[in-house]
Image (spheres, helix red, strand yellow):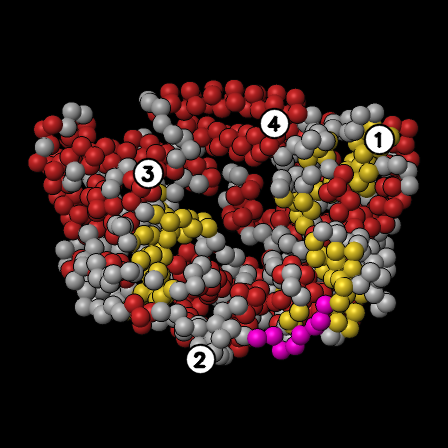
Amino acid sequence: MRVYLIDGYSLLYRAFYALPQSIATSSGLPTNALYGFTSMVLKLLDSEEEVGIGVVWDGGLPAFRTEVYPEYKAQRSAMPEELRVQLDHLDEILEAMNIPVVRVEGFEADDVLATVSRRLPEGVELYIVTGDQDAMQLVDGRVRVLRTTRGVSETKVYGRREVMEEYGVAPEQIPDYKALVGDPSDNIPGVRGIGPKSAASLLRRFGSVEGIYEHLEEVEAKGTRRKLEEGRENAFLSLELARMRFDVPVEFDPERLRFRGVAPGVRDVLLRRYEFRSLEPRIAGLPVSGGGRPRPESAVRVVEDEVEPSLEPVAVAPAGDGRWCAAVAEDEVRLVQGLPERPLQVHDAKGVGVRGAHFDTYLAGYLVKPGLGSYDLDALAAERGVSDVEARHPEPVVREAARRAALVRALVPRLDAELKEMGLSRLYYEVELPLADVLAGMERVGMPVDVRTLEEVGREIEGRIAELEEEIFEHVGHPFNIGSPKQLSEVLFEELGLPPVRRTKTGYSTDAKVLQQLAIEHPVAEKIIAWRELAKLKGTYVEGLLKLVGEDGRIHTTLNQTTTATGRISSDSPNLQNIPVRTETGMRIRDAFTASPGRVLVVADYSQIELRILAHMSREPALVEAFKNGEDIHTRTAAEVFDVRPESVTPELRRRAKMVNFGILYGISGYGLATRLGNVHPAEADRYIQRYFERHPRVTEFIRKSLAEAEELGYATTLFGRRRYVPELRNKNKNVRKLGERIAFNARVQGSAADIIKVAMVDLAPRIGSLGADMLMQVHDELVFDVDRDRVEEVAALAAERMVAAYDLDPPLEVEVKAGERWGRVKPLGGG
């Protein structure tokens, strides 16, 4: 039997920091850590037919460590309030899932796990589930570590070989390894100046810390020998702290951990109380203690039919080989060849290749409750009390298609009623549903790519990266792996002696914010920032894009309609919306995207749409008049905020005013604005924001009313009625509530902008199609078209006209149109 023992606090913290803190119940209870923890447990239960499972919790800091080193784990901050309130609910979830808990007072979870690992009965394999490296010392023939490597969704199994590959030492040498390099997460000091590579090399040669010090005179490198001599006391202290105990008074009976099924009321706890509806399909497949797996409450018969089903519309699901299952009655599904030519009801029309769907339960689920990320058919059905069905057919693929078609048929009237009740029917039927066909067409056409240009840009970036590496190594005095956070930390804070800015669980941080602060102290930090930016461009937007060019010479991105809570369309595999446009290198990458042979790219872009929406929704005269008079809005704001005449506004003042204008849209703080502006004190940035609100009182009042309404209702709405739920507004923590305020206000403005461009896309697609043009891409407020040369002016005028007509805004929408053969080199046209 395989037994999984979960290091409780390790997994809980990992889930908390990996998943968005916006995950919460409708009552405002944060549940991101609970959700991630539960998801991992379900993943483990699904991995084997016969498993044991338990959660091991710390029983307090052990005296045998704190007595020898009072600073042991003393640096750890208190548990965040948003996590503490979740911890109070975890016992209920574990009880509902019938997962036993192990806790021994005065001992850490690591020591409990160590003791258990040495008491395994014959035939039992132990997998320790953790995010920490401590448990690696326990790995042997029947003990492995299942380590969460990225959040809680990705894991890696460590046996002896994997430990040696990653750390360069055997599992039993891990305590010695930690004694040398230290462990900031546990406040284990280690030997100052000894890094991972040196530690591994020393241990491979001498075997242990004791062996190293017994043969210290044989260490040839004088600097290393000196560090070891100076750090002898810390080395042996750290070794005592790092070694796990194997004598914890704990009983271990694998049979007590054998999983025999969830409690009968598990759905009430997970699906209703904590609203983990996306997990419902995984819960449904688990056995219930005292019985078998849940049985469907109803069944449908599958009839193979040569003719089309008579019901209009009909709910369908693909059954493979060109066959479709069509649900025509509560107890009957017909298996037909090819799609019936009639309006269809389906789940994820774009995903299964249905065009012109009459109803899409996937999109309806998203619109009713955006921000979940997953709109699984079974979860939607369970949430609405729709009973699962069993289909009778010898082929598994047909049975599953029949089951799904029957669920769609039952769900449609329920979701349709919800859309009407929430005032979302028009947005759904006139925008989201037809948009799915538009996006499918864009994905199918793809973006033409000039591979030679992309390769050329790659060589240019490689050359600049090599130059930066030489400059960085010259500053440091020797080569090192710039991409390794550990090595970079050693270079910056130990060798160069720069002041550490922030400590993390694995050491001192070297993230972008830290490097920006260090750039004031040493020029090497600025070069490292540039190196990272270029390395990312090369890996993501050159090498990554080259791998995705199809045989047709195009890149076919996926345009997601349901991934953002604001309603914005997103792009992935690859993400073509995030190609940098403010750098020369980024524009060179855009140069690689071209028009089709003999054609021209036409790019239509809304001008300052979010600021215009703010003017419209707030009815602020200063903003409305500025736009109607054709004034430069940033120059006008600069004049008002900095109290100068418009003609006296310098480029620098205009830049600052632009930051203020867009900062207001995103609820930026004085500190945040100061950081963006640079060389400005937060108090001064606060004054900029205050002056803005003094000169724009209706904006102030609009924000106040928007937040009050969102707090009362639990959601913010766009001009089209789209909802963005904001449970953060009801959170007890002040910082979380402030985040909710920014989300709520931004959702009104950014969500409205997203709706407007969607309306324009639905309106434009058939019109430009009739002119022989293709819509290729949408990047936030920008649409890209592939157009015949002799149709450029016609398509440009049509795009500008229909994009402006998408919503009757006051002040009116404005569109700038450009054209060119390459995306990075489009130039403004005379009209538009």
Q: Earlier in the sequence, mark 1 or mark 2?
A: 2
- Front disc: 1 or 4: 4
State the residue position of label 4.
585
- Per the image, label 1 sits on a secondary structure element best described as loop
Is 367 displayed left or right of 676 in the figure?
A: right
Which mark is first along the chain, 3 or 4?
3
Of pointers 2 and 3, the one earlier in the residue sequence = 3
**For residue 750, side relative to residue 139 (left or right):** right
Q: Nearer the viewer, residue 791 or 572?
A: 572
Quarter of the view holding residue 193 = top left
Determine contact: label 1, label 4, CB under 8 Å. Answer: no
Whether the residues at callouts 3 and 1 have beta carbons within 8 Å, the answer is no
Cα distance between the residues tagged 2 and 4: 64 Å
Image point (88%, 34%), residue name: 831
Task: Decide which of tag 3 and tag 1 comes sooner along the chain.
Answer: 3
| SS class, disc 4 | helix
Place of residue 530 in the rendered image (x, y in percent of width and height, measured from the top left): 50, 29
User: Mark 2 or 4 closer to N-term?
Assistant: 2
Per the image, the residue denoted by label 3 is: 165
Image quadrant where one finds the N terminus: bottom left
Instruction: In the rendered view, tell whether residue 219 sits above or below residue 662.
Output: above
Q: Is residue 299 visible?
A: yes
Q: Residue at x 52, y 19 (%)?
A: 463
Type of residue at label 2?
Gly
Q: Amino acid at mark 1?
A: Leu
**Three-letter amino acid code at disc 4?**
Thr
Image point 62% across, 40% down: which residue? 574
Whole-percent x, y for residue 116 in the image = 24, 62
Q: Find residue 325 and report its image quarter.
A: bottom right
Q: Which mark is residue 290?
A: 2
